[in-house]
């Protein structure tokens, strides 16, 4: 009873502070261990959008910059456990709040989230710091952004790393129902059915009304929740409306959960849901048509790292390996690792991940 009252009070205080602080979202309400808010900077990109990013110069001038791109529903603080470990190894760290999140612009027009433009934004952020030797690392939808950096700006990056979600080749317009049917036939369930819910006009209102349920599913104590309660079309919405609850996993604290809830109660999900709308409407597929055929995959000279996770029922390692073992990566130097983790490997297995990424860059001759 005392614990529940404490968390309720904490949630209220966090919501009060965050609602007044966002979109200048750096506040004293940050939980212990989060990235230092005084190390954040802002820049305005060439299309007039403000981007916020965490920036720590290298302690070893021979080390490259690591451009860290998070996914959904997240922000740069998802790197809170990995970034200090990279910094301790001498790297410059540039962890971006991606479009739609935290201190970065949060447009509601889905077309603002097309990857040709987001890739340009990220290069503008790199240029704002006048950086040259950069390695791009993405998790979840951040892997899509890193994929498009390799398509549009291959000359700007030394190497590419993909966590949980693999490199994503240029898309072709397709009927989304047919995509789900193909997944059902191949895997026995739909992997991306929940995308349809995120593209619905009332998705934000439903999530807001059932935030504890949403956190129980997004951060699953049992990874099977993603297969049964999230991935299939209609499952996520059904479980939210039923107010499904489960304990939090061990890798995220109660205070971290309360911060997540307070932030999204203050800011909502409508803006970042644009990352899904461009997929279900073919907007991204049409955007990808401008990628030249000879740039459909990263240059063969660029080292590639894929960190798969064994307990992710949506970003499946076997699906990723179909791409990395396919003709598009013939001749590439690809390092494959798999972690005993659910989707949130950058939080739960930060030490293993940083160790392996550091070794990969050393083996590739980049450090």
Image: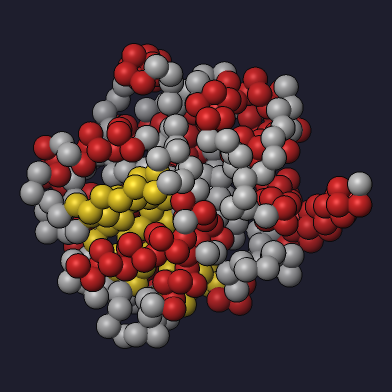
Outermost residue, left direction? 331
Q: Nearer the viewer, residue 31 or 288?
A: 31
Vertical placement of 354 versus 317: above or below? below
Q: Is 16 on the left or on the right of 173, as rendered?
A: right
Give the residue drawn at x 74%, y 65%.
29
Q: Is residue 336 visible?
A: yes
Vertical placement of 160 versus 249: above or below? below
Q: Is 118 on the left or on the right of 305, as rendered?
A: right
Give the residue drawn at x 50%, y 61%.
79
Q: Nearer the viewer, residue 350 or 16?
A: 350
Q: Position of residue 100 (x, y in %)?
A: 54, 49
Q: Position of residue 9 (x, y in %)?
A: 87, 54
Vertical placement of 244 versus 80: above or below? above
Q: Is 152 on the left or on the right of 206, as rendered?
A: left
Q: Position of residue 63 (x, y in %)?
A: 30, 78
Q: Is residue 211 visible?
A: no
């Amino acid at each position: 009873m005392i614990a529940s009252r404490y968390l309720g009070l904490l949630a209220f205080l966090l919501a009060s502070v965050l609602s007044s602080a966002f979109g200048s979202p750096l506040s004293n309400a940050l939980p212990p261990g989060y990235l230092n808010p005084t190390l954040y900077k802002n820049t305005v990109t060439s299309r007039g959008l403000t981007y916020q990013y965490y920036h720590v110069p290298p302690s070893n001038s021979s080390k490259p910059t690591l451009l860290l791109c998070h996914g959904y529903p997240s922000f740069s603080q998802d790197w809170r456990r990995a970034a200090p470990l990279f910094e301790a190894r001498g790297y410059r760290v540039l962890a971006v709040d991606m479009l739609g999140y935290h201190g970065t612009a949060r447009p509601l027009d889905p077309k603002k989230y097309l990857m040709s433009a987001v890739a340009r934004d990220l290069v503008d952020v790199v240029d704002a710091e006048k950086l040259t030797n950069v390695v791009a690392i993405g998790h979840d939808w951040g892997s899509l952004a890193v994929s498009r950096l390799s398509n549009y700006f291959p000359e700007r990056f030394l190497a590419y790393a993909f966590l949980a979600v693999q490199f994503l080749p240029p898309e072709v317009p397709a009927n989304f129902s047919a995509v789900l049917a193909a997944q059902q036939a191949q895997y026995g369930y739909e992997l991306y059915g929940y995308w349809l819910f995120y593209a619905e006009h009332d998705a934000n209102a439903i999530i807001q009304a059932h935030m504890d349920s949403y956190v129980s599913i997004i951060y699953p104590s049992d990874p099977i929740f993603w297969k049964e309660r999230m991935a299939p079309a209609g499952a996520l919405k059904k479980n939210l409306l039923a107010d499904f609850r489960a304990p939090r996993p061990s890798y995220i604290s109660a205070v971290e959960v309360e911060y997540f809830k307070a932030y999204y109660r203050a800011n909502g999900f409508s803006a970042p849901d644009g990352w899904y709308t461009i997929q279900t409407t073919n907007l991204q597929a049409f955007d990808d048509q401008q990628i030249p055929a000879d740039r459909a995959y990263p240059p063969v000279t660029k080292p590639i790292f894929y960190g798969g996770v064994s307990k992710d029922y949506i970003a499946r390692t076997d699906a990723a390996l179909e791409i990395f073992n396919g003709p598009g990566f013939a001749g590439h130097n690809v390092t494959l690792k798999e972690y005993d983790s659910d989707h949130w490997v950058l939080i739960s297995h930060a030490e293993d991940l940083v160790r392996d990424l550091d070794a990969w860059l050393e083996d590739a001759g980049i450090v």
